[in-house]
Image (cartoon, helix red, strand yellow):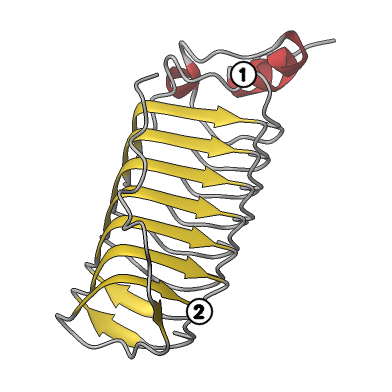
Amino acid sequence: MKYILSPQLPSNLQEIKTIAAVDDDVYSDGLCHTNFMAQKASRVTLKRLVFKNAVFREAIFGSCDIGDVRFEGCDFSNSCFEGAVIYRAEFLGCRLTGFDLSGSRIRNVVFENCTGKYVNLRYTKFENVAFKNCGLQSADFQSATFSNTTFSKTDLRQAQMSGTALAGIDLSDCDIDGLGARPQDLRGAVISQEQAVTAAKIMGMVIR
């Protein structure tokens, strides 16, 4: 696993009281507790920011550019950042339920202690990404691309990974019960002995 680059943040962040999402606008260098609930904007740029307990629920930000940003305890439930470019970012203790990041490019990003049931990551490209202790039940990773990506102690029950090559991906300490994948997708993945029954079912084997 290559080293994941951390967000490059200013040493002193000034608090930003309010931000209203506007098309093609750039927001940078600050600490935010902003409520973006149900706001809509396109081509939003977020740079060198820390968001604490910010609410993005049901927001729609199309083709946004997010770099050198940390999200702490933020709520992205049912929001849509489809086609986003996200790099050098951290999602820590965030709620990602129903979050749509399909078709995004995610590089040098850590997701830690997040809940993300039904998160949509279909066709997303991951490079140098770590999922740590996350709940991603029924997440959609179909046709995603993993490069130097790790899953650690993450709940992937009923997650869909059909069309996603898992060769070299270590799932041995994750819950993969009901994982949706094709036999060729699972080839080369690292699993534990306890997970062999689940893998066998995917391979079409019958165990008695």
Question: x, y (%) of residue 181?
Answer: 52, 31
Would you say residue 122 is visible in this rendering? Answer: no
Q: CA distance from mark 2 to mark 1?
A: 49 Å
Q: Residues within 10 Å of mark 1 (few under 14, many from 20)?
A: few
- Given residues 134 and 83, the one toward you in this image is 134
In the displayed structure, 50 sits above or below 106; it is below
Of callouts 2 and 1, which one flags the residue occurring earlier in the amino acid sequence?
2
Residue 137 vertical placement versus 81 (above, below): above
Numbered disc 2: secondary structure: loop
Q: Nearer the viewer, residue 126 or 188?
A: 126
**Image coordinates for residue 110, horizontal then vertical, percent:** 46, 42
Q: Quadrant of residue 147?
A: top left
Q: Quadrant of the C terminus?
A: top right
Residue sitting at 46 percent across and 56 percent down? 120
Instruction: Give residue 204's mark.
Output: 1
- The type of residue carrying mark 1 is Gly
Find disc 2 in the rendering and name its residue: 33
Q: Closer to the camera, 180 or 190?
A: 190
Query: Is residue 141 or residue 76 the one in the foreground?
Result: 76
Picture layout, residue 196 above or below residue 15: above
